[in-house]
Structure formats: structure tokens, C-alpha cells
Image (cartoon, rainbow, N blue to C red):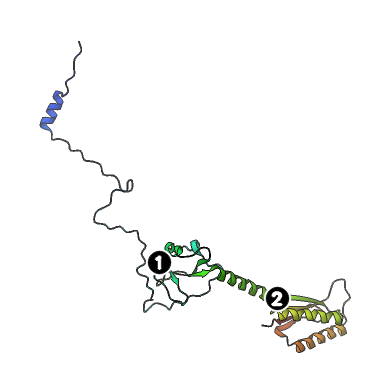
Amino acid sequence: MSHTRPVFSAAQALRSAFLPPVQVHARRPAIGSLNIYRPKGRNISYRPRFDHFNTEPPENAPRLSVATTPSPNAPADSAIRYPIIQTMNEDGTLNPPTPLRQALRNVNQLDESLILLQHPTDDYPAICKVFSKKTLRQQQYARTRTAKLKLAKQVELNWAIDPHDLSKRLDQVESFLAKGKKTELVLTPKRRARRATPAEGEKVLAIISEWIEKVGVIQNKPKQGEFLGYMQYFFEGKK
């Protein structure tokens, strides 16, 4: 014969009679596990703080001096790592500080580029300016052309050169100078070639000196070297 176990035992009846009931509270989720709990009385803001920057510098701030032409390696667009920037207008005035993301939205990525002109200071955020990509290409071309002009050309002669060939070489030097290029004229004895006599060497120097006076060549420094050895003339290109 099977026995049915009572739902409430004597122990449970005594416990409920003499002990207070246990209150069960719902567990509050931990901070960070779910984004549903926020501590009361605290206003948490994730907006970038740039209210301390002004379009006009404080009285004791150093005067702002920003180059209007960007350097060749200046960061551009998304390569700029400062979250808050100020953009410069064509007249040199500054717009209010703005987040970099917002400034990039206003840039036409096809024809324009945002370039960093100055890193942030205590009084200013990073200063940037929008340039047309055509202007940037023109500036790069001008820098490359200037760098090429600064490289000195070199024309080498043998001390035993005949007057006709010497005249052609001097014409070549003159053409380089007319293009604005610095040019070096080098006199040196050639290997496996006849060595010039002192009289021939003196004649070569006389022709070069006469050519310098006739053409009006500017020597940016005195000639260096030794007679019938290695000797250099340094000429400045015409501007």
C-alpha cells in the first residue's frame, strides 16, 4: 500500500510559526554588464570638451603665427589625429573650434583636402585649412622644380683641352647658368691622356677668366684646387 507524503511537514509548520519570513530582492544588474543602470544624481556627458578654446586669444597669449602654405609632410584629412580643430579662412581668420569629423564632412573629398597647419597649443586647438588639390599639386611641382634648380651642374675639362673644345664647354656652362642652375667648372688631368704643359694650363685659365668677364658670370665662392691638378670654379645661376 503506497503512502502519500504530506505537502507541509511538521518542521515547515514550526519554522513558519516561529521564524520571520525571508524577503527576496531582485538582483540589480552590475554596472557594465548591461547598459540599463545609471547612478542617480550624476550627469555623464561624452561630448568633447573644447569650451576653453576661443577664436580670440587671451590677453596674455602669444600672438598666433601660422604658415599659410602647408609643409610637404603635413598630415591631411583622416591622417590628422586631433579630435578638435579650428579651420582657417582665406583672410586668416579662424572659425570656432569644431570636431574633426564634422569638419571633414564639409570637405569635398574629390577636389579639396584638409591640411594641418599648426599643432595644438595651450590657447588654440590644431589649426587646419582646406586647400584645393589642384593648388597642392602646383605647390608640390614648384618645390620639386626649385629642388632641381638647386642641384649644381658640373662640367669637366681636361687641362690639355684645345681652345675650340673649351669654347664649346663654356657655352654649355653658360646655358646652364641661363636656366638658373648653379654650375661647377672642373679642371682635372685625364687618365690615359696627354698631360698639359704649364703654358697650356696658363692659356686655359686665361680663356676662362676672359669668358667670366665677358659673360658677367657670378662666382659664389673663389675657385679651389691646384694648378694642373684638380681645380673647381663655382658659378651662380642667373635669376
Q: Residue at x 39, y 77 (%)?
A: 61
Name the spot of residue 50 as percent of width and height, x first.
37, 67
Question: In terms of image quadrants, where is residue 133?
Answer: bottom right
Q: Residue at x 87, y 83 (%)?
A: 200
| Depicted 23 relative to depicted 63: above or below | above
Image position of 137 (left or right of 82)? right
Name the spot of residue 198 as percent of width and height, x first.
86, 83
Question: In terms of image quadrants, where is residue 103?
Answer: bottom left
* Secondary structure type for disc 1: strand
Name the spot of residue 184 as percent of width and height, x first.
74, 78
Marking on residue 206? none
Of the 4 image quadrants, the one containing the N terminus is top left
The kind of residue tagged 2 is Ala
Name the spot of residue 10 as percent of width and height, x first.
13, 23
Is residue 232 at least partly visible in the picture? no
What residue sits right under mark 2 in the picture?
Answer: 152
Nearer to us in this view, 141 or 149: 141
- Of tags 1 and 2, the one toward the viewer is 1
What residue sits right under mark 1 in the picture?
Answer: 98
Residue at the extreme top of the image, as rendered: 1
| Depicted 167 relative to depicted 14: above or below | below
* Secondary structure type for disc 2: loop
The kind of residue tagged 1 is Thr
Packing grade of label 2 (10 A; few <14, some 14-19, many >=20) is some
How far apart, in angstroms, are the residues tagged by discs 1 and 2? 47 Å
Disc 1, disc 2: CB below 8 Å? no
